[in-house]
Image (tube, grey):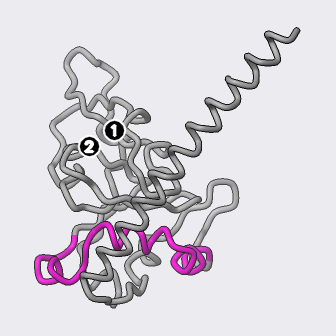
């Protein structure tokens, strides 16, 4: 089933149209940046920025629970929005997907985000990438992406495995850092 059939898809806000140079009288919003979404589909709030707007910005440009945001610049990554990450401003180099009510019992947002991050979807996106210096994917490529319709139980299993993988990789990265410190200290002590 195509993504455009199961969700509403829109690009984020073109920031230059709303940016304020006068921070004292501006509306301040937390802004998603390119670094905010990593290759494992995790939203890292450490990389959020602040955006100062001339006027109040419409709610359609902010994240809501179970939305999916997709990075439109290469490399293309997606993540599902959790409750604690609501009300973040989505810039134009991201797309926002909201699963239609009719399909909310058939498709889980985390499953869709995982599928967008899969090698199959990435191959499809490569065909529709444009630009030479800064490669961007067309919104049409996201709209036309075929999402396999599988039972919710299988989607939940995929999500659990993907989350376990993320946790394990995070722990391994932390272990590498600790081992580097450990061996550096040993070598220092020897010298």
Residue at the disc numbered 2: 88
**Looking at the image, do the residues carrying marks 1 and 2 touch, with CB atoms under 8 Å apart?**
yes
- The percent position of residue 167, horizontal first and vertical second, equals 44, 51
**Residue sitting at x 24%, y 82%:** 152
**Residue sitting at x 27%, y 69%:** 109
Residue at the disc numbered 1: 31
Hey, which quadrant is residue 55 in on the image?
A: top left
**Residue sitting at x 45%, y 50%:** 37
Does residue 89 appear to the left or right of 164 in the view shown?
A: left
**Most distant residue in the left direction:** 101
Residue nearest the viewer, comparing 129 with 15:
129
Hey, which quadrant is residue 116 in on the image?
A: bottom left
Magenta segment? 99-126
* Residue 105: mark in rendering: none
Element type at marker 2? loop
- The percent position of residue 76, horizontal first and vertical second, equals 52, 62
Residues under labels 1 and 2: Cα distance?
Answer: 6 Å
Local packing at callout 1 (Cα closer than 10 Å; few below 14, some 14-19, many 20+) is some
Majority SS type along the magenta span = helix
First along the sequence among labels 1 and 2 = 1
Does residue 77 appear to the left or right of 69 in the view shown?
A: right
Element type at marker 1? strand
């Amino acid at each position: 089933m195509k993504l455009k059939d199961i969700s509403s898809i829109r690009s984020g806000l073109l920031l230059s149209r709303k940016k304020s140079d006068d921070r004292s009288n501006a509306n301040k919003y937390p802004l998603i940046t390119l670094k905010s979404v990593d290759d494992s589909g995790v939203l890292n709030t450490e990389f959020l920025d602040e955006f100062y707007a001339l006027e109040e910005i419409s709610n359609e440009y902010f994240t809501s629970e179970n939305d999916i945001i997709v990075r439109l610049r290469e490399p293309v990554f997606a993540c599902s929005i959790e409750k604690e990450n609501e009300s973040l401003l989505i810039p134009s180099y991201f797309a926002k997907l909201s699963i239609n009510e009719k399909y909310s019992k058939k498709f889980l947002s985390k499953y869709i985000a995982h599928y967008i991050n899969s090698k199959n979807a990435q191959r499809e996106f490569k065909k529709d990438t444009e630009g030479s210096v800064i490669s961007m994917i067309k919104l049409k490529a996201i709209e036309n992406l075929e999402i396999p319709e599988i039972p919710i139980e299988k989607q939940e299993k995929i999500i659990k495995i993907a989350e376990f993988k993320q946790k394990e990789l995070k722990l391994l990265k932390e272990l590498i850092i600790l081992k580097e410190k450990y061996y550096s200290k040993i070598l220092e002590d020897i010298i």
